[in-house]
Image (spheres, rainbow, N blue to C red):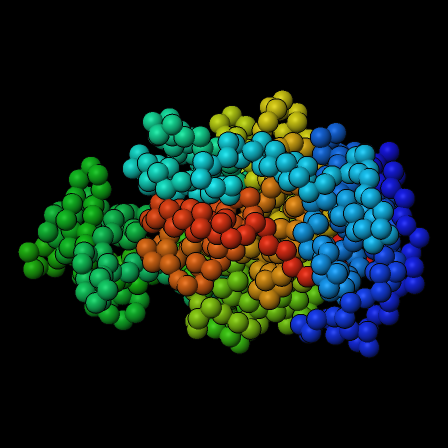
Amino acid sequence: MCAAAHVTAPAPAAAPPHGPAAENVHTHTPAPVPALDGVKGRIGELIAAAIEEATRRRRDIQAVLPQHRQSAVNLAHYLGLRKLDVRRLQGQLTSLALSSLGRCEGHVMDTLLRLSSWLAGEPYQATPGLLDAARAEAILHRNTHALFGPKPADRHVYIMATAPDESEATESWADGILEAGVDLLRINGAHQTAAQWRNIVSTLRARALVHGRSCKVFVDLPGPKLRTELRSRQPPLLHLPRHKDARGRTIEPTRIELVDEYRDGAQLPIPFAWVQGLGTGDRIGFVDAGGRLRELVVREAGAAGIWAECGRSLYLTAGLELTWRRRGRIKARGVTGEFPARLTELCFAAGDLFLLNADGRLADALSAGIVCAEPALLAKLRAGERVILDDGRITAVVESLTPGGLQCRVTHTLKSPTRLRSGKGIAFPDSALSLPAMGPEDHAALEFALQTADGVEVSFVNSAQDVRLVADTLRAAGKPGFAMVLKLETRQCIENLPEILLEALTYDPVGLMIARGDLAVELSFERLAELQEELLWFGEACHVPVIWATQVLDTLAHAGVPTRAEVTDAAMSMRAECVMLNKGPYAAEAAQMLADIIGKMEAHQYKKRSMYRPLHLALGPKPGGP
């Protein structure tokens, strides 16, 4: 039986009137001192609501691990409380110099019962199985240390850094982030290979030993993220920009390999016979796809390939006329070979049209198309629903459903025009879609994590079933203490949050990540502003540590100088148990500044609390979908 069963709700008195006539909850005018009987009756209603929610969820509570059962009970109590509007009551409690319920996330029932006892003029007697503030905080700290490792020496908030590419993961990089205070490393399983990840981890751990530091490693599973593949009636185009300084002056030439057949990267396909005869100093002239006269000078010709240079940018397509010269004399003429269609990039501005389908066919009236290789998902889209490309850089809306696919019109772009390349993410925030929780890439990243890392971060969790699938896989691996972090980043996840959290408590150690970038794409930046606060509260309610992620001090990490908004955001982040930084050439400087900000802020606040209103998260999914 859950602890809620041992609590008896006081008989509720007549509740004070609600609505605009009772009190304007949006003003800051002090409320008059209320009648104690009315306040006591309202507290009784809250206790009854919390008990009812715990009773309703008794089966789920019994399914969690024994060490998490008190947390599950408290989560149910919190859900019951947050289904109600208690803002008026909070003002009344404040006028009585009592707890306004603004700090009760981790110990809901104990706070309510203490208030009830005081209002009744009776001594408070602790109820067995209920958590008070000290025990709730101790459980959260215990879970945090089990997930992230020993507490940092000078703060309670951990810092997680994202690993760079293997070529940049040098000993000096590892020394820099460790000295700056990084406690955890995140490997992005959507990029590079297991061999490259292994080299990164080896470098970090070797340097951590030198520094006498502990630094756990987490692998971010790629998840079932949809990717774009572009189609266009325009010929494939390869753009090679020149290397220039801040004044626009060329600082080094554009370097390109001359090949008989295009394979990848900065390559120009030329006639096969030329590959055997070109020598150092030879020149190839042509007019590029932009109509500009260009000339390549061969600098290397040998076993390592033929490499040429040009002092200007290049726009290359198939069929460009080439002239090969040696010592000023024409040696041969020819044309550039074919480029594969995957080189295509499209530019979009507001008002542009494109066709979205699964087979890449283009309608006669449209010259641009985007392929999403999930026909079953596309069949569920409806006119008026949004299509988000490249993490929000381009927003479109489904305008009509045609036999050839979905005709979409661009409504917003980051700038005009905005370029889109193949392989970028595509999301449908208004659509109730479901994807398989784990694909081949996820299994490969998970296998590496179980062999080499300390935990995984599960991407695109949408339901309790998704949590159960990964948790069962980890349990079957037989690695006690292997961590699981659930990334909160989709509309479906938010709709199913209570069930996801209760399922999370069947595993240990477990944590949550607020993936703010994906949440903003799915639910809008306006909704994100309040949602990130609500998710912090829910994490504390079930005593599960939370990682605050996406673009923290991002400008500093990439350019070396932060923005004012980023500094404020970093200060807000310290209410989580861990803060994640993205990779960048100034990652160590970003980690150092974050550690300094957290150290200063911890002297002023610990887990900020706000006024309460009914939460859609507590109410659960709406009938008929999101």
User: How many numbered dots are placed on residues in this image?
Assistant: 0
Residue at x 75%, y 61% (from the top left corner): 96
> Measured along the vertical axis of the image, is residue 442 above or below residue 450?
below
Q: Nearer the viewer, residue 358 or 411?
A: 411
- 589 above or below 214? below
Quarter of the image for the C terminus: give it: bottom right
Q: Quadrant of residue 318?
A: bottom left
Q: Residue at x 7, y 60 (%)?
A: 328
Task: Answer left or right for 10 relative to 578.
Answer: right
Residue in view at x 53 percent, y 62 percent: 392
Q: Nearer the viewer, residue 259 or 175?
A: 175
Q: x, y percentage for residue 536?
A: 62, 51
Q: Quadrant of residue 567?
A: bottom left
Up-down: is 160 above or below 614? above
Does residue 77 appear anywhere in the picture? no
Residue 33 image offset from top left, x and y in percent: 78, 67
How far from the left and from the top, in percent, is residue 622?
79, 59
One can see residue 607 in this view: yes
Whole-percent x and y of residue 107? 72, 44
Residue 83 or residue 206, whichever sits in front: 83
